[in-house]
Image (spheres, rainbow, N blue to C red):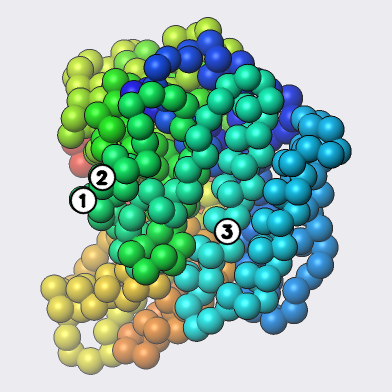
């Protein structure tokens, strides 16, 4: 079994879908499982639709039109107008419209998962039909029935035993299989998701369950770089990374690989290739059990638009185990990820990525028992294998808010 994962950038238009087909054909083996994200920036479009309707109870028709027009244009680039792919899309789009109106309940995360998952549904149905037209017979699989999770919406935990049973039930000994990334389902049949950018994790889950020979993530860059080329002038491409180093970089926010992706692969020693769908002939980066890092250079991760919450007690208690446990349980229940924390005897500071829905919820709940202050518009820099010279260069003329460091990693929160 070979696992391929294609992200949104690799299926952003008709030409990109054709390119995906060419890549699959060039690597065609006896057994392949292909995981695909929503097309282009469609997940953002779905999130805009969801947030707008959730907050106002008013459906902005233009937000639905953006989603419809984007996919319809790609259909016209790939198929004649009488093709079944159009009928299939129209049917599923009506299901989306109905779900937006009828699916809203008391839980924003559950509503989010139900609606946003249509992005992957649309993309994989469209690609399924195009591969068939291009002579690549494939079996479309519904990830909601394939990857089984608990009901922790927006960040569901995998039930590995049930998922293994389902995969072995639906995936045969031969052929090309196509399914959705990011999307899963609980035992009650509700749609769940695996966390933002969770398509990589979906592919890793399937690689683990299938004992895959290797997994390949196809990106718009030809490997894993030491920093984002859009933010730094001097960057290096890693030819090799260890599983451990990749986990650390992903945990701190490197967007090339989802943080949860590495562990299932590491457990079974399944190598991960990061390759370019633009230049598929290039070697890319291999992440494996080999402990070598080639080349050995510092790695930089930047998270913009960070939100700093400072929490302090109102009584005589300290911010120790009891209060910390309470604070982190609140974060977990609302579904916010802490990027950095700093603790003193009487206060706790949490650095979070800004979220227009979850941050206000978090602050409202915390203010019931604590005094809460906040700062916004901050930048969080993380450097692996840092030097003092690098730290001073990053600080520049910025105001230092928080600095945390250990032997290999420094994190700088700057204003």
Q: Quadrant of the N terminus?
A: top left
Mark found first going from the N terminus, 3 or 1: 3
Given residues 199 and 319, the one toward you in this image is 199
Callout 1 crowding tier (Cα within 10 Å): few <14, some 14–19, many ≥20 = few
Say if mark 1 contacts mark 2, CB within 8 Å.
yes
Left or right placement of residue 110 versus residue 82 in this view:
left
Q: Which residue does the numbered mark 3 point to in the structure image?
A: 116
Identify the image quadrant of residue 172. Answer: top left
Left or right placement of residue 166 versus residue 145 in this view:
left
Q: Which residue does the numbered mark 1 point to in the structure image?
A: 161
Identify the image quadrant of residue 310. Answer: bottom left
Q: Which residue does the numbered mark 2 point to in the structure image?
A: 164
Please report the residue visible at 44 percent of the width from the left and 9 percent of the height from the top: 283
Q: Position of residue 381 (x, y in %)?
A: 42, 43
Please report the residue visible at 81 percent of the width from the left and 67 percent of the height from the top: 61
Q: Position of residue 106 (x, y in %)?
A: 50, 83
């Amino acid at each position: 079994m070979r696992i391929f994962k294609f992200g949104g950038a690799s299926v952003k238009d008709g030409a990109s879908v054709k390119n995906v087909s060419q890549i699959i054909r060039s690597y065609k083996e006896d057994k392949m499982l292909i995981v695909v994200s929503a097309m282009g920036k469609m997940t953002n479009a779905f999130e805009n639709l969801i947030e707008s309707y959730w907050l106002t109870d008013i459906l902005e028709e233009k937000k639905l039109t953006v989603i419809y027009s984007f996919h319809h244009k790609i259909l016209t680039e790939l198929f004649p107008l009488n093709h079944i792919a159009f009928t299939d899309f129209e049917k599923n789009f009506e299901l989306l419209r109905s779900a937006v109106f009828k699916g809203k309940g008391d839980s924003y995360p559950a509503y989010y998962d139900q609606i946003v998952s249509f992005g992957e549904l649309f993309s994989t149905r469209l690609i399924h039909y195009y591969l068939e037209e291009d002579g690549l017979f494939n079996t479309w699989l519904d990830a909601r029935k394939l990857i089984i999770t608990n009901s922790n919406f927006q960040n569901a935990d995998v039930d590995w035993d049930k998922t293994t049973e389902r995969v072995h039930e639906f995936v045969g000994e031969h052929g090309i299989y196509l399914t959705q990334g990011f999307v899963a389902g609980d035992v009650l049949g509700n749609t769940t998701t695996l966390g933002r950018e969770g398509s990589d994790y979906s592919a890793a889950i399937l690689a683990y369950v299938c004992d895959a020979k290797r997994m390949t993530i196809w990106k718009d860059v030809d490997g894993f770089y030491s920093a984002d080329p859009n933010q730094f002038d001097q960057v290096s491409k890693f030819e090799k990374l260890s599983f451990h180093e990749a986990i650390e970089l992903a945990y701190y926010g490197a967007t090339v690989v989802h943080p949860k992706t590495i562990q299932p692969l590491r457990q079974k020693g399944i190598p991960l290739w990061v390759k370019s769908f633009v230049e598929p002939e290039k070697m890319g980066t291999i992440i494996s059990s080999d402990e070598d890092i080639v080349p050995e250079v510092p790695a930089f991760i930047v998270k913009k638009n960070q939100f700093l919450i400072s929490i302090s007690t109102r009584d005589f208690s300290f911010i120790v185990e009891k209060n910390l446990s309470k604070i982190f349980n609140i974060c977990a229940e609302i579904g916010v990820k802490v990027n950095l924390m700093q603790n003193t005897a009487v206060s706790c500071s949490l650095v979070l990525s800004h979220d227009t829905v979850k941050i206000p919820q978090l602050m409202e709940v915390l203010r019931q028992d604590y005094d809460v202050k906040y700062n916004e518009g901050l930048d969080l820099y993380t450097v692996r294998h840092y030097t003092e010279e690098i730290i001073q260069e990053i600080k520049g003329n910025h105001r230092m808010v928080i600095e945390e460091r250990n032997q290999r990693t420094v994190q700088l929160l700057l204003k």
